[in-house]
């Protein structure tokens, strides 16, 4: 076999390997994201019934074209209208966005100094600090939330500490409140903010700060005008990693919150498992998906346009 033919065969194999590497992520997204979303969208256009499955119409491929037309005619957008006119669901969405926004802001305020200190620490210490940040993941999430129940209850560790220090005269009702929800969320999602921030700050060129200091810039000005702008990718990654899952959080508000802390994750669980209203629950889930994905897609579009203008 000639050398040219051998090289051609290798090129074909590389080409197919490259195509396969590109197609696999798209196949994964189609199979586990697009297809379930389409199924949920179909269910959202159905009506609730006491049957199995708990909705109609159900598509019967063996019924032919007439059955398919009847199936399409039976679909309805009434559930979408009900979601936007029912104050309970609107309040759940707004409460989820409020809790997610405030929690993410608190996590950023706490996480940025931690990540900054980790990035400025000696190399030998950085690995130890990184392990300490990741260490909570070695314990099951549910167990950690149950531990906070014991800490925040009236005779829990937090009240005992405050009483022993003389800060309060009587135990405070931490549990079953918005405060407990914020504490649980900030504790649980803090590593998701610290890790991307640390990765960005650790790669930052120290010569930029040194040059600014040589030019007479005070430390606070170096931080706000050099460090923070250069760490913007880490800030954005941390905010998205925290904000998106917090909006749909179920376990923390259910275990630590009160009846007034009704987030959309709890509403979704109630519709699916308690009310067995799959069509309405699908509507709630899809609207939440649009609320979360819409701003991300818009931001990516604006970023792409900004890059094109910069070129």
Image: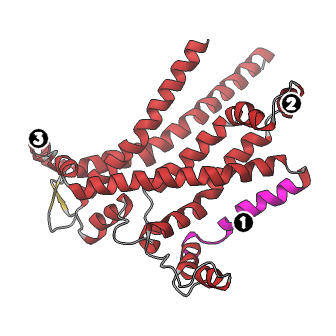
Nearest-to-viewer mark from 2 and 3:
2
Task: Tell which circle, 3 or 1, labels the residue nearer the N-terminal end.
Answer: 3
Q: How far is disc 2 from disc 1 in space, using C-alphas?
A: 36 Å
Residue located at (67% from left, 46% from top): 196
- At label 3, counting other C-alpha atoms closer than 10 Å, the crowd grade (few under 14, some 14-19, many 20 or more) is few
Taking the view exactly as shown, the residue that stands out farthest to the bottom is 155
Q: Is residue 303 left or right of residue 157?
A: left
Q: Secondary structure at mark 3?
A: helix
At 8% across and 42% down in the image, what residue appears? Answer: 66
Q: Which mark is residue 135?
A: 1
- Quarter holding the C terminus is top right
Range of the magenta residues?
125-143
Q: Earlier in the sequence, mark 2 or mark 3?
A: 3
- On the question of residue 253 being in view, the answer is yes
Residue 117: x and y in percent read 79, 51
Which dot marks residue 69?
3
Q: How far apart in space, not on screen, are marks 2 and 3 (Cα)? A: 73 Å
Q: Which residue is mark 2?
A: 213
Q: Is residue 197 above or below residue 221?
A: below
Q: Residue at x 22, y 63 (%)?
A: 277
């Amino acid at each position: 076999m000639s050398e040219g033919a051998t090289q051609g065969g290798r090129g074909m194999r590389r080409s197919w390997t490259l195509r396969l590497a590109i197609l696999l992520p798209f196949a994964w997204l189609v199979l586990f994201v697009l297809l379930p979303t389409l199924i949920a969208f179909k269910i959202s256009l159905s009506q609730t019934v006491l049957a199995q499955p708990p909705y109609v119409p159900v598509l019967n491929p063996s019924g032919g074209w007439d059955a398919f037309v009847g199936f399409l005619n039976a679909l309805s957008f009434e559930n979408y209208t009900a979601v936007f006119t029912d104050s309970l669901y609107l309040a759940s969405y707004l409460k989820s966005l409020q809790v997610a926004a405030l929690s993410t802001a608190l996590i950023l305020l706490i996480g940025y100094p931690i990540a900054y200190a980790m990035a400025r620490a000696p190399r030998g210490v950085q690995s130890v600090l990184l392990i300490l940040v990741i260490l909570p993941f070695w314990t099951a999430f549910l167990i950690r939330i149950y531990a906070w129940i014991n800490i925040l209850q009236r005779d829990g560790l937090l009240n005992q500490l405050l009483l022993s220090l003389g800060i309060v005269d009587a135990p405070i009702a931490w549990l079953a409140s918005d405060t407990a929800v914020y504490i649980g969320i900030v504790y649980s999602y803090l590593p998701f903010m610290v890790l991307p921030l640390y990765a960005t700050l650790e790669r930052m060129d120290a010569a930029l700060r040194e040059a600014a200091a040589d030019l007479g810039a005070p430390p606070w000005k170096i931080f706000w005008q050099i460090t923070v702008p250069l760490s913007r990718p880490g800030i954005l990654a941390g905010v998205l990693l925290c904000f998106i899952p917090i909006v749909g959080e179920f376990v923390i508000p259910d275990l630590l919150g009160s009846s007034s802390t009704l987030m959309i994750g709890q509403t979704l669980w109630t519709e699916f498992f308690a009310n067995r209203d799959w069509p309405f629950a699908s509507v709630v889930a899809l609207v939440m998906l649009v609320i979360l994905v819409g701003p991300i897609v818009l931001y990516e579009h604006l970023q792409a346009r900004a890059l094109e203008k910069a070129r």
